[in-house]
Amino acid sequence: MGQKEDVCRYRLMVSRDALEVVQGKWRLPIIISLTHGNKRFGEIQRDISDISPKMLSQELKALEMNKIINRTLYDSMPVTVEYSLTPLRLSMEKMVDELINWGMHFRKEVVGT
Amino acid sequence: MGQKEDVCRYRLMVSRDALEVVQGKWRLPIIISLTHGNKRFGEIQRDISDISPKMLSQELKALEMNKIINRTLYDSMPVTVEYSLTPLRLSMEKMVDELINWGMHFRKEVVGT
DNA sequence: GTAAGTAGTTACCTATAAGTAAGTAATTTG
DNA sequence: CAAATTACTTACTTATAGGTAACTACTTAC
């Protein structure tokens, strides 16, 4: 008894997991910025013009912890740090595509009305 | 000039639109509860055992405004209200499936490690 | 008239997300 | 030696999300 409900609860749990990785104001912008090539802190900051260094630092850490991006420190002078995407980010492609697809549909049907 | 950036900004905008509809603690649980049939306020509340009437009422209103659910008032005594899904909810199927798929993958690769 | 069931609302409080402004440390350039 | 560039950090504040408890209004059953 309750097997259907278990499946349902599991689906809820993992969809919440997925949402937590991409939700928030800055995570998708950062991910998308890095999709156009590896970048340094300052470059991402210039890409996303209204993000503060505090938020960028905080969100980069969160994305690194979730294994979406890599942080590589180069021992050059001025010290440079390069951020790049991981294979896990590449596995998000379909999900992000479907968010975009449905977002377009939603905007046509509801927002644009 | 900037056509690529316009496309990028548009994708960001619509993916944020999509996220806003499903994000939060209770929206997916409510949507999924109604997937198993039209339900009344109290039934949803019993389905999602730890939701308060305030949050349920608030989130049902948000989902109704976004045209994900319908609210139908029946003039019976005791007044009953039935909530049901709209065609727009049905169009979310792929997106929700991909959230679940990637969430499973993420949990295997990161959470479960 | 009291309790229980219908579907919520209201006021208040706490927790989390995000913003603002300034500071740090190391090095390079003029 | 002062200014600029690298990549941040810290302290403080504001805004939004969510939680708690009690209350409303109507009707039926006992």
Image (tube, coloured by chain):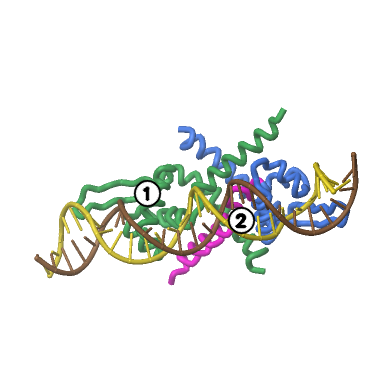
Chain colours: A green, B blue, C yellow, D brown
Marked residue chain, label 2: B
Which mark identifies residue A84? 1
Q: Is residue D22 left or right of D28 when viewed as pictured?
A: left
Q: Which mark is residue B46?
A: none
* Rendered-image quadrant of the C terminus of chain A: bottom right
Q: Residue at x 68, y 48 (%)?
A: B30
The residue sitting at 39% across, 51% down in the picture is A58
Label 1, residues with CA under 10 Å away: few <14, some 14-19, many ≥20 = some
User: Which chain is home to disc 1?
Assistant: A
Residue B63 higher or lower than A49, as above or below? above
A5 displayed left or right of A79: right
Residue labelled with disc 2:
B21
Q: Which residues are magenta?
A: B1-29
Is residue B14 highlighted in magenta?
Answer: yes
Q: Is there a contact, CB below 8 Å, between mark 1 and mark 2?
A: no
Q: Would you say residue A33 is visible in this rendering?
A: yes
Residue B93 lies, in percent from the top left, at: 66, 49
| B9 to the left or right of B57 | left
Q: Is residue A98 visible?
A: no
Q: Could you tell me residue B63's position as x and y percent?
A: 67, 56
Q: Does mark 2 fall on the same chain as mark 1?
A: no
